[in-house]
Image: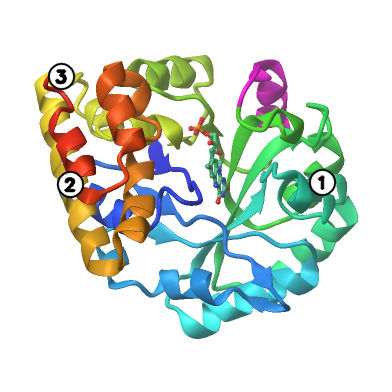
Amino acid sequence: MHLYAAPLQGYTEAIYRNAHAEIYGDGPDRWYTPFIRVEHGEPRGRDMRQLSSPLNTNHRLVPQIMFRDADEWEKLVTAIMETTTYREIDMNLGCPFPPQVRKGRGAGLLGRPDELARIAELMKGHPDVTFSVKMRLGINAPDQWKAVMPAINSMPLAHVTIHPRVAAQQYGGELYLDDFREIMAKTAHPVIYNGDIATPADIDRVTSQFPTLAGIMTGRGLLARPSLVDEWRQSREWTPDERLDALMRLHSRVAGQCEQTYQGETQILAKLKPFWDYILPSLDRRTAKAIKKAATRPAYYRAIESVGAE
Ligand SMILES: Cc1cc2nc3c(=O)[nH]c(=O)nc-3n(C[C@H](O)[C@H](O)[C@H](O)COP(=O)(O)O)c2cc1C
């Protein structure tokens, strides 16, 4: 059973992944980068630079690309092949952000089987790359995957990660598990489940519900409970003290790197505060409010000191 960390733009960046890999020894088998895309006709410089960060060396990282058509796809794959040593590439067919979907990127490609068939052909020209797909069930109906399944099945893929929602739902609402079961049966590739995994028990529940799964990918659940994968692997829920101790060490590494990497209080705080976004609901209200409102570093670090002290 593979356990993967989902890409979250603005959260699972190099600093976070590196710190997580330092603190949590039994963590995810692979991390996926937030999507890399084309901007002004070229692979975006900032995205490509992130790939060569020295912080990436302590964990297994797979670049994820988001593209509109075969042309953008080829540009991104070529850039990764020519300028990096990564030989695994994940393809984003799930991003629900309406401006991107309208342009045909992310989940938008679920409505364009012909373009996916063209890309499947191009993949034959890159036999040294291991590709995977991360997708949803559809754009606005959970059976739209059926139209693209022939193209996806014709691709040489290591696995398909499926988030059983449609793009119109964004990240909330009902999970279409019956459709997930159906897509699993119709996919020629190993399937990774992704969506709303928050506890080790959730991993057990989903794997017993779908015993042929090749793995689980977790995003927000891992950010809210960074020990999630370690706990599941160790078949033991950590005590609140163990979880808090590791969390504070994780934060301390992330904060240290942010202080080194970014300049100016505003920028440092803007990079640091998202660390707490998915953790805040589990904190007491006063601490959560103090973290959210902190406008200076002293106020921020004071607020952090009260995490777990309630
Ligand atoms: C803020 C945010 C940013 C995301 N960025 C990406 C991304 O860059 N690439 C991608 O494939 N999915 C992205 N996702 C989707 C997650 O990878 C994941 O599929 C989704 O959150 C469902 O899994 P979860 O319930 O375990 O979080 C993002 C989700 C959120 C909430």
Q: Is mark 3 within 8 Å of ligand 1?
A: no
Q: Quadrant of residue 238?
A: top left
**Residue under circle 2?**
298
Q: Quadrant of the C terminus?
A: top left
Under mark 3, the amino acid is: Pro
Q: Which residues are magenta?
A: 172-186
Query: Label 3, label 1: how many angstroms apart (C-alpha)?
Result: 47 Å
Q: Tag 2: residue type?
A: Pro
User: Mark 3, mark 1: which one is toward the viewer?
Assistant: 3
Mark 2 or mark 3, which has the lower sequence index?
A: 3
Q: CA distance from mark 1 to mark 2?
A: 56 Å
Q: Is residue 151 magenta?
A: no
**Residue 233 shows in this picture:** yes
Q: Amino acid at mark 1?
A: Pro
Q: On the picture, is 277 further left or further right than 91?
A: left
Report x, y in % for residue 180: 66, 25
Judged left or right of residue 39, residue 35 is: left
Q: Position of residue 16 (x, y in %)?
A: 31, 52
Q: Disc 1 marks which residue?
A: 150
Q: Which residue is mark 3?
A: 240
Q: Residues within 10 Å of mark 3 (few under 14, many from 20)?
A: few
